[in-house]
Every structure is written in C-alpha cells, then in structure tokens.
Amino acid sequence: MKNIAIIPARKNSQRIKNKNIKLFNNEPIIFWSIQAAIKSKLFKEIFVSTDSKKIANLSKKYGVNVLYPRQAKLSGSRATIIDVVKSEIKNLENQNYNFDNVCCIFPAAPLLKYNYLIKSYQLLKKKKSKGFIFVGNKVEKKILRSFYFKNEGLTFFKKNYINASTQDLPTPFIDAGQFYWGSKQLWKKSKSVFLKTSNIFLLDRSKSIDIDNISDWKEAKIYANK
C-alpha cells in the first residue's frame, strides 16, 4: 500500500500566535510532527500544506515536500481539515502522484510518537479502510451532564442524561487532534472524519493533548518534559 502524509500548517492562528512554528522544547513545534512521520517509515511522501513561505522553507529544511501556496479560501479559520485534504489530494492527482492512503498529521502535536502512526496504520488495514482512524482521549462521564447558558437560561447539552446515574452513562471520548488516517477514496467522498464506521486509536491525554490554547501548550510542555 502506498501512503502519504499531509501536514496542514497555516500561518495564522487565533489563540496562539504563530502556533505552528512556535518553539516547543527548542524546536518549531511542526518539527515534532515531521520527525514522527519520517521515523515511522510509513510514507512514500510527506507533504506540508501551507499558505506561509516561512513554514514552506522550514519544512523543506526538515526534508519534506511542500504544497505551497495553499488556496486562500482554504487558509482561513473557517476552512475544515477535510476540505484542505480533499483539495491537496486533487492537487497531487493532477501532478500524477500515485497513493492509496492519506494520514493527515496535525502540525502542533509535539507528543506524537512514530509508533502511534505505525499501530494506528495497522488498525486501518484491519478495518479495511471502511472508516477513518483518529486519536481520541477518554473523558469523565460527568461531561454528559454539562450545560450552558443562552437567552432562555440554563440548557443541558443532553437532557436525557440529567437524572441518569454515573454508572449508567456511556463513556465519552474526544478528538485528540493528532492525526487522521483514511484511504484516498474515503477522504474524497466524505464530509467528515467522524463517521459511524470510523474507529478510535485511544491514548491518554498525557500522550496526545490537543493544543488549542496557552493552557494546553503549558500542559503539553509538562508532559513532554516527563
């Protein structure tokens, strides 16, 4: 099977300035994703998709290919990962690249280990590409009884769980923001990674924290230094 990796790394980030190249343990954070992809030896080619010349040059320095410039409409905060990957698949097909599977690796995933990629790829093959494989964390069941406030006042996310006993609640999971595996054809036809046929590659938060804000960044540094 021919695999490629696509690392989508845009220049702007809303909560952490220049997040995708901000130094994490003395290296731009994207370095750790690139290094894990290279060490896994799973990929025929590794591409960084970006709208930043600086990120493109840095990625070339680390020995991977770049898809630059990314379309402006796919570089804003509203652009979805699946739309970016679909666009780059089409771009690569137009350049006559031949591949079967795509692993979308997030650029801000400094806790990513190459063996996570290998083990999750084995899961993808076992499931015969019927769905995506994504990294997830288990979270406390009590989140199912969480609520928010709107104009009408206090509102529960899941009303049917308000009075349920904790032991009767299903176990919830969240996307850890490390990588998504899927066949090329699945990427091309899907509107979301989270399909009924998709499967979770379960990791603890200490191994796969989704860095969305400064608090997450600081927490990831603690885990990395351990």
Image (cartoon, rainbow, N blue to C red):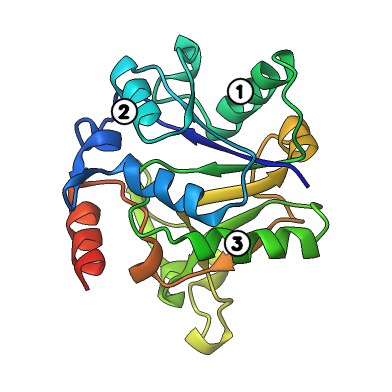
Q: Which mark is residue 88?
A: 1
- Residue at mark 1 to residue at mark 2: CA–CA distance: 19 Å
In the image, residue 71 sits, relative to residue 151, either above or below, namely above
Identified by mark 3, the residue type is: Ile
Residue plotted at (60% across, 33% down) = 82
Between marks 3 and 2, how big is the CA–CA gap? Answer: 25 Å
Image quadrant occupied by the C terminus: bottom left
Please give the name of the residue rendered at 66% of the width and 58% of the height, measured from the top-left corner. 121
Mark number, residue 58: 2
| Amino acid carrying mark 2 in the image | Leu
User: Looking at numbered disc 1 in the image, what kind of residue is underneath it?
Assistant: Glu
Above or below, comparing residue 141 to residue 67 in the picture = below
Tag 3 secondary structure: helix
The image shows residue 65 at horizontal and vertical percentages of: 50, 27
Q: Secondary structure at mark 1?
A: helix
Residue 180 image position (x, y, % from top left): 58, 48
Residue 150 in sight from this viewpoint: no
* Vertical side of 87 occupied by 24: above or below: below
